[in-house]
Image (cartoon, grey):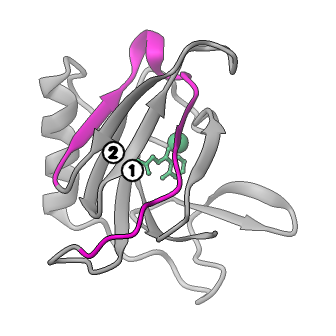
Amino acid sequence: MAVETSNCGAAGWISDRQGYRYSSIDPLSGHLWPAMPPAFGELATKAALAADFAGFEPDACLINRYAIGAGMGLHQDRDEQDFTAPIVSVSLGLPARFRFGGLSRSDPLQSVLLQHGDVVVWGGESRLAFHGITPLRTGDHPLTGSCRINLTFRKAR
Ligand code: MD6
Ligand code: FE
């Protein structure tokens, strides 16, 4: 089951024939990504600060929409330039089980149920930790219906 993706901010995460990369242009529209709404950037900066990462100024907000049955396999977020900046993840809509491990794929995993409104910040020693989302279970959320939306804020460049 696929996750549908979009972006806002100066940099967007795309996949095309050349593979995965950050691009300032939306390949579907040929235009720049929409600007990151100031409230989004402020939320990410404040959440990072609350986790002791001062001065986080994301230039990318990945928007992922998970349908029922969609998940994301264990992976590292390692295509950003600056690993001193954390990742801030905001969960909306249906709950999902977030699995969070260590720097090796085979490290033990913690499992956390992310509910509507939950924010996760990871950085420092954990910046390159493996993580993933187990396939979404059937449900109906009053705000999003039968999906989950995840925003991840990064400093891509
Ligand atoms: C989540 N998302 O959906 C975790 N990583 O809670 C991710 O780990 C993620 O949404 C890379 C690209 C997009 C993502
Ligand atoms: Fe990720």
Which label belongs to residue 89? 2
Q: Where is residue 54 in the image (x, y as percent from the top left)?
A: 20, 23
Q: In this view, does 29 lie to the left or right of 84?
A: right
The segment highlighted magenta reads: 117-140
Q: Position of residue 29 (x, y in %)?
A: 58, 90
Res 39 visible: yes
- Label 1 belongs to which residue? 152
Front residue of 50/42: it is 50
Q: Where is residue 128 in the image (x, y as percent from the top left)?
A: 56, 22
Image-quadrant location for residue 2: bottom right
Q: Where is residue 21 in the image (x, y as percent from the top left)?
A: 69, 54
Q: Which amino acid does label 1 sit on?
A: Thr
**Would residue 60 be counted in the magenta stretch?**
no
Q: Which residue lies furthest to the front in this view?
A: 138
Q: Residue furthest bottom?
A: 29
Q: In which quarter of the image is the N terminus?
A: bottom right
Query: Residue at (58%, 27%) from the top-left corner?
Result: 130
Q: Judge the density around disc 2: few (<14), some (14-19), many (≥20) Cα neighbours within 10 Å.
A: many
- Alpha carbon of mark 1 to alpha carbon of mark 2: how far? 4 Å
Image-quadrant location for residue 89: top left
Q: In this view, does 113 lie to the left or right of 64?
A: left
Q: Up-down: is 89 above or below 33?
A: above
Q: Up-down: is 15 above or below 87?
A: below
Image-quadrant location for residue 17: bottom right
Q: Is mark 2 within 8 Å of ligand 1?
A: yes
Q: Up-down: is 135 above or below 147?
A: above
Q: Which amino acid does label 2 sit on?
A: Ser
Query: Residue at (61%, 32%) from the top-left corner?
Result: 76
**Would residue 132 be counted in the magenta stretch?**
yes
